[in-house]
Image (tube, rainbow, N blue to C red):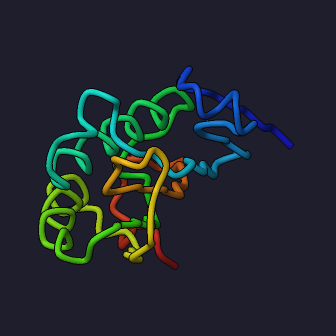
Amino acid sequence: MSVMKIGSGEPFEAVYGYSRAVRVENQVFVAGTTARAADLEASAYVQARSALAIIASALSEVGAHMDDVVRTVTYVVDLADLDHVARAHAKVFGATLPAASLVQVSGLAPPTARVQIEVTAVISSQRGVDPAQTAP
């Protein structure tokens, strides 16, 4: 079984002992991701876009793309941010339509984070092939 682990160099990874992304064969699991420090004082929309950019970079490092994402879990501190976070999610995944959950939590790390996103991706060996044409 092939396993690839990558980090982003962010301090939380070393402190808490985890990888940003782990690829096992054709499956990729990206850890809960918050915005970069520069975006942590911004709106929930900006934070979500920042987290999604980090996720896209992690996926790229293991040979995956955002269109390989099959599931997202988004955590928000305030449900009032739902529309803003959903708009960022739709902008990135509108054509992909992964299974998605959104959960309100009492807080995130770091404390200024309003949004955290994790994803699961399955890398297709038939990227670009219409699934309807390959179905039995």
In the rendered view, would you say 7 is above or below 120?
above
Q: Picture coordinates of residue 15 (x, y %)?
A: 70, 31
Q: Residue at x 45, y 44 (%)?
A: 110
Image coordinates of residue 36 in percent, x first then y, are: 34, 32
Instruction: Identify the residue shown where x is 16% and y is 53%.
Output: 45
Q: Quick check: 42 left or right of 1?
A: left
Quick one: quadrant of the N terminus? top right
Displayed quadrant of residue 131 = bottom left
Q: Nearer the viewer, residue 85 or 53?
A: 85
**How many numbered circles are shown?**
0
Is residue 75 rendered to the left or right of residue 2?
A: left
The answer to whether residue 101 is visible is no
Residue visible at 64% across and 28% down? 6
**Whole-percent x, y for residue 47 in the image:** 25, 46
Among the 4 quarters of the image, the one containing residue 94:
bottom left
Name the residue at 39% across, 65% down.
74
In the displayed orientation, state which residue is furthest to the right.
Answer: 1
Residue 74 visible here? yes
Residue 105 at what x, y percent from top left? 44, 72
Please indicate whether residue 116 sits to the left or right of residue 12 in the image: left
